[in-house]
Amino acid sequence: MIVDGLKTIDLKTINSIFSLENFDDSLKSLYKLQAFSQIKLIKRDKNTYILKVKEYPKITKIIIKGNKKFSKDELLKIIFPKYQKEENNFIETLKIDAFYLSLTKYREILNSIERYYKNHGYSNPKVNILLKENPNKKTYTLVISIKEGKRQWIKNIFIKGNKKIKDSEIKDVLLNKEQAILLFRFHPPLVRDYFPQEIENIKALYKGKGYLDVQVKDFPLVNCTKEGECNLTYIILKEGPQYKFGNITIINAKYFDPKDILKKVKEVRQGKPFNYESLEKLKYLIIKYYQEKGFYNSNVIIQTQVDKKKKLVNVKIICLPGKRYFINRINIKGNYKTKDWTLRRELDIKEKYIFSPESLSRSLRRIYQLGFIEKVKPKVDVIDNQTLNVTLKVKERAFGNLKVGAAWNTASGLFARASISRANLKGTGDTINFSIEVGQSIFYFDLFYKHYYLFDKPINVIFNLYQKQDTYQQYTSAKTGFSINFEEKWKKDWYFYQKFTITKNSIKDSKDPEIQNSTRTYFIFSPAAKYNTLDNPYLPHRGSYMKLSTNLGYDFSNKTRGYFKGVSLEFIHYINLDDYFYSKKVPVTLMNRLYFGICSINTPSEYKFHLGGDYTIRGYDYGEIGILNKMWTNTIELGYDFIDSFRSVLFLDIGGDFKKVYGGYGIGFRLLSPFGPIRFDFAWKLNPEENQNNFNFHFGISSYF
């Protein structure tokens, strides 16, 4: 066989792929090379065949001309997503991975560049592509010439003809956005390709609220200056009457009462304004109900019948529960160091039992709350019409951490610091942490150990042996003691704690006349109940956390003090705004934290409530506002996730002693580093007193357990 027409492809490559005996498959394999525009097999004589091929131009270099707004590297990244930036960016000819320029590839390059310019406000970019033969006469250089034209941006967007729906609601569904300095939209681009979709979005908004006869002008009016500043006007030609719900019928409602499910969506009622969004919510609730009962592939079909005379929409909701699904096998992958049963005991799903998405979500939360698992990706594979497999792919964190250092201060002189921590010991989940400070006049240490599943029961036990010193504005506290804490899992997301502490505390260097220098020995019993549905213990996006804590203590050194007691309640709730937007990603998180605490008057100062500091009111040092018998705080945070492991926050803290209110505000950052979660907060006091420092910087780093 003779091969004719080869320019850049080696003959050996053709011979390794093509054979006359398997002609059809060989021909497909040749075309898969994406190098040939034409392949023909010609029979020259009885024993000789000619394989005649025509190659596409092979491109080895690219020249881009006329680009002013965007760099060559930026444009090449649009054409070739895997393109690596050239070190010598100033050269005209750019080296690339060689490819063959088919007609499809030609159009793809042309369209991608034009689309990129249009998406940035260049309404009429001109892109021209030419081929320049290289000196070897076999390959080519692709020359891309660009005429960018004038960039246009949107100053204002006007809505006309709307009476039933506000301007702001209509603007929210538009893809083009007007200038908004406070939102950092200084010169938002005019993208004309968005117009058809925007008109459909406006119609969908009206129809979703029951205005089924709405009419919208096909394109907005565009008025631009020579400088590129544009105003857009969207015109509602006809809003029409608002249709109402007519008859609402739920068909095949197995395992639930239709009246009960309709009570949860009050907007879906006969005589109320017709609303597609409410119907979708109702559909979601029905499917969720069925899935929690094991009907994994359940579906709901909504049929509507419009009565134009009566302006009613009759609705039929057809339930298709299907069959119940049971879990055949639960597979865990990626746990190279963690033992399989360490993760399985956290699962709320079981093999051979009914599959529940809610139980799967709870299982993922529990695995995240262990602290040493960075990511969990679930995958559900249906085997047949009644069984499925669940696969959990996990990514483990670094388990060990060693820190060594030295420090000096006037009180203690030179001293050495060291700490070692290890999470997930031998893959069991157990955690140990030991830190020590040694100097001429000091010896402090803290030993922490957490053991999971005591006697193979859902009870965790935490041991803590310590000798430490904390310096506050009002006094210095030295503590030596031991505590043991039992953590028991209740049903679903509830936990119960019983902590026992024996400690010898010394107060010295007191600057507050109400706090006397003394040494006391205490026994403290601290029961607590906790509810936790946070999706991540270090950087949550959604869920709630609530903890009710009590302290019941006895002072062995001061019988006149005797028993002392205190109680506190903490509630945290996270909302992920991305859950409420379906058309675009909104990486914004809202957090609200409420805290209330009260203790008896005879409670030692160390166990009273210290108002001010990282976790009460930022802008103040720890306990700067006061040491109180009762306290409340409220924190609101607005967070923006740049990436999964980095978040910026705006925060407002307020609180007080039920007599006076204090506050702080500022900006902060949260980072999940390889060494542990890190937080930075820059905080200012709301109402600083005269001669009081207004600013404070808060920093914290912890381990992944």
Image: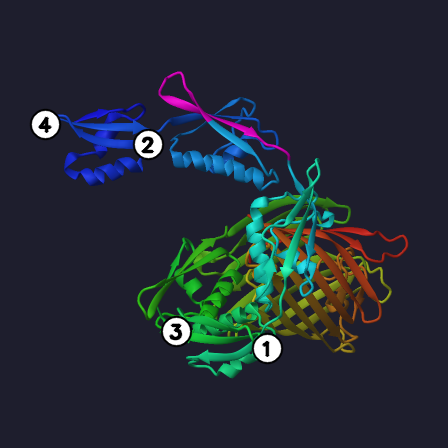
Residue 231 left/right relative to 305: right
Say the numbered circle drawn on residue 47. 4
Q: Earlier in the sequence, mark 2 or mark 3?
A: 2
Query: Mark 1 or mark 2, which has the lower sequence index?
Result: 2
Residue at the image position 49 percent from the left and 73 percent from the top: 305
Task: Using the image, tell me which numbered label, if any, was put on residue 354.
Answer: 3
Q: Position of residue 172 (x, y in %)?
A: 64, 56
Residue wearing tag 2: 35
Which type of secondary structure does the marked residue at label 2 adopt? loop
Q: Nearer the viewer, residue 183 or 532?
A: 183
Labels 3, 1: front one: 1
- Name the residue carrying label 1: 266
Q: Which residues are magenta?
A: 130-150
Give SS at disc 1: loop
> Disc 4 to disc 2, how far (Cα)?
28 Å
Q: Nearer the viewer, residue 84 or 233?
A: 233
Q: Is residue 136 magenta?
A: yes
Quarter of the rendering containing residue 474: bottom right
Judged from this view, the residue extending furthest toward the top is 135
For mark 4, give the secondary structure: loop
Residue type of the residue flagged with mark 1: Lys
Q: Mark 2 belongs to which amino acid?
A: Ala
Q: Quadrant of residue 295?
A: bottom left
- Secondary structure at badge 3 equals loop
Question: Residue 531 at what x, y percent from top left?
Answer: 58, 71
